[in-house]
Image: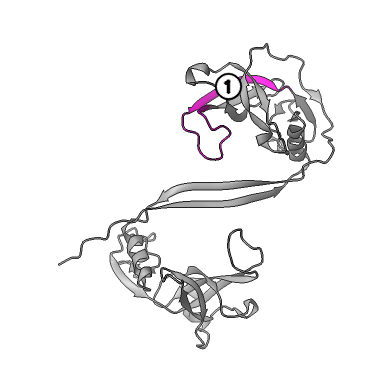
Amino acid sequence: MTAPPPEALRAPLVVEFPFTRSLGPVQSAFLTGLRERTVLGVRTEAGEVLVPPVEYDPVTAAELRELVEVATTGTVTTWAWNPEPRRGQPLATPFAWVLVRLDGAGTALLHALDAPGPEAVRTGMRVRIRWAAERSGAITDIACFEPYESAEDETGPAPHDGRFDEPVTGIVAPARLDYTYSPGRAQTRYLQGLGERRTIGERCPSCAKVYVPPRGACPTCGVATTDRVEVGPRGTVTTFCIVNIKAKNLDIEVPYVYAHIALDGAGLALHGRIGGIPYDEVRMGLRVEPVWSEDGRFPDHFRPTGEPDADYDTYKELL
């Protein structure tokens, strides 16, 4: 008698990290200008003014350095209503996402428009920038746009040298993705197996490769993988890297080693941290075994087994 399939799991998942980048002269001038309530664009070889500015011409790939100042008023070229703002968006109340061509610019800037409802928004409406009370040199220095009845500023863009006191040279932008993850039946069995300190993969009936974690189907042959196989618990380090930068909210001292580990019986390697050995002694072919987390739900890291290193020929196809 066939056992009923396990109930699919569901759990909220958050992926969050700070994105850090340095700025070239054009982007530095643009963001520093926002801090000073000045909007800068860049002129292309054909004479078009791009806002936001870029450092290379999108048509000719030529380097662009001719900065110009444009107006803080503009025209909505297209829009979409956002009835339920999410965490981190410009406004906490319903608003419109708009593309605004600032007066003097040839391209449109994406931002939020503060409006009482979708009936108050239209293509062609005139708007102006509402500046943030506190500005640091980021796109958020523009708090939003707001409706503004005015004629188009026809004075045109004015040359600007892009020089400001204390220019912004780098930015850190937080990236965050909130979603509900449902692993499906194959990975549900895999996760439930980990709760029993067992690693369960699935074998392709065509090529016989054992996938860990299982995917429910073989990506090479395109057939269902219903034959469950227990692998490990020991395995072999195939490749690895030494991590020297400490991750936020991760209580692991650097440097440490993160490796691809081919569990015995598996047809491909999975990721795992190596512990119990100095980082500079980790090597390809090192035999390792899992050290389970305190709650026993997953391997916290892998440690050496004390066995002789695996021969390269036994794992070279898994690199």
Q: Quadrant of the N terminus?
A: bottom left
Q: Indicate the colouring scheme.
A: one colour
Q: Residue at x 32, y 72 (%)?
A: 229
Closest to the observer, 65 or 14: 14
Q: What span is colored magenta in the figure? A: 71-95
Q: Mark 1 points at which residue?
A: 77
Quadrant of res 53: top right
Compared with 205, 103 (above or below) is above
Residue depicted at 53% across the width and 27% down the height: 95
- Asked if residue 207 can be seen in this view, the reply is no
Residue drawn at x 73%, y 37% as measured from the top left:
31
Query: How many numbered discs?
Result: 1
Whether the magenta-drawn stretch holds residue 166 is answered as no
The quadrant in which residue 30 appears is: top right
Where residue 300 sits in the image (x, y, percent)? 49, 71
* Side of 210 where 95 appears, left or right: right
Question: Compared with residue 171, is residue 239 higher up or lower down, i.e. above or below?
Answer: below
Q: Is residue 312 left or right of residue 51?
A: left
Using a 10 Å C-alpha cutoff, classify the residue at mark 1 as few (fewer than 14 neighbours), some (14 to 19) or many (20 or more): some
Residue 24 vertical placement versus 145 (above, below) = below
Q: Is 92 placed left or right of 26 in the picture?
A: left
Can you give x and y, in whole percent of width and height, for residue 165 in the image?
85, 38
Residue 164, position as x, y percentages in the image: 83, 36
Q: Name the kind of residue labelled 1 in the image.
A: Thr
SS at badge 1: strand
Q: Quick check: is 92 in the magenta stretch?
A: yes
Instruction: Say if residue 273 shows up in the picture.
Output: yes
Q: Which of 191 and 270 is in front in this view?
A: 191
